[in-house]
Image (tube, rainbow, N blue to C red):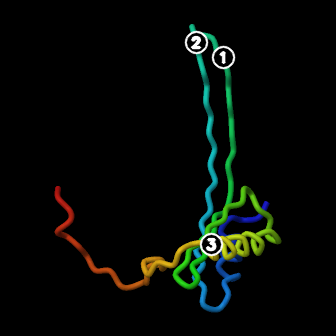
Amino acid sequence: MPDLADLCGLAVDAAESGEDVEAYASDGQRTQVRVRGGDVESLTFADSRGVGVRVIVGNRVGYAYAADPEEDEVGELVRSARQSAGFAEPDQGNSLPSLGEVGAMPEIFRE
C-alpha cells in the first residue's frame, strides 16, 4: 500500500508548465453499532483512504479524487483534474495562496 504523502508528492510533481496543483490525502476508519432493547442489531466497520487533486490552470479549477490509488494511477488523476478544469469558468480568485512569513498575533488571543 503506497504512502499517502508520497502519492500527494507525485501528484504535485505531475504539474505542467503554467499549472498549480494541490493534493490532499485522507485516511480514516468508522465504526457504527446499532443497539435496540439491549441487543446489537448491526455492526459496521468502514475504512476510507484516498487522494484528491485540484489543478488550477488559466484561472480555471479542476478537481479529481481517487479512492486508494496506486502510484501509477496518480498521473491519470491529475490528467482528470486538468481535463475538468477545461469546463470551468475562469475566475481571478482561483489561485493557490502564496507563502509568506507570519508574525505573532497576540491580539487574537484572550485568556
Q: Residue 22's quadrant in the figure?
A: bottom right
Residue drawn at the location 42% of the way across and 77% of the way down: 93
Mark nearer the N terminus (2 vs 3): 2
Kindly state the secondary structure of the residue where label 2 is placed.
strand
Q: What residue does disc 2 label?
A: 36
Q: Residue 81's quadrant in the figure?
A: bottom right
Residue 41: mark: 1
Q: Position of residue 102 (x, y in %)?
A: 32, 80
Q: What residue does disc 3 label?
A: 87
Kindly state the secondary structure of the residue where label 3 is placed.
loop
Mark 2 to mark 3 CA distance (whole Å): 49 Å
Q: Are marks 2 and 1 in contact (CB under 8 Å)?
A: yes
Kindly state the secondary structure of the residue where label 1 is placed.
strand
Q: Taking 101 as reference, is 8 left or right?
A: right
Residue drawn at the location 59% of the way across and 16% of the way down: 35
Mark nearer the N terminus (1 vs 3): 1
Mark 2 to mark 1 CA distance (whole Å): 7 Å
Image height check: is 93 above or below 43?
below
Quadrant showing the C terminus: bottom left
Q: Taking 97 as reference, is 109 left or right?
A: left
In the image, what residue type sits under mark 3?
A: Phe
Q: Residue furthest right?
A: 72
Residue drawn at the location 68% of the way across and 35% of the way down: 45
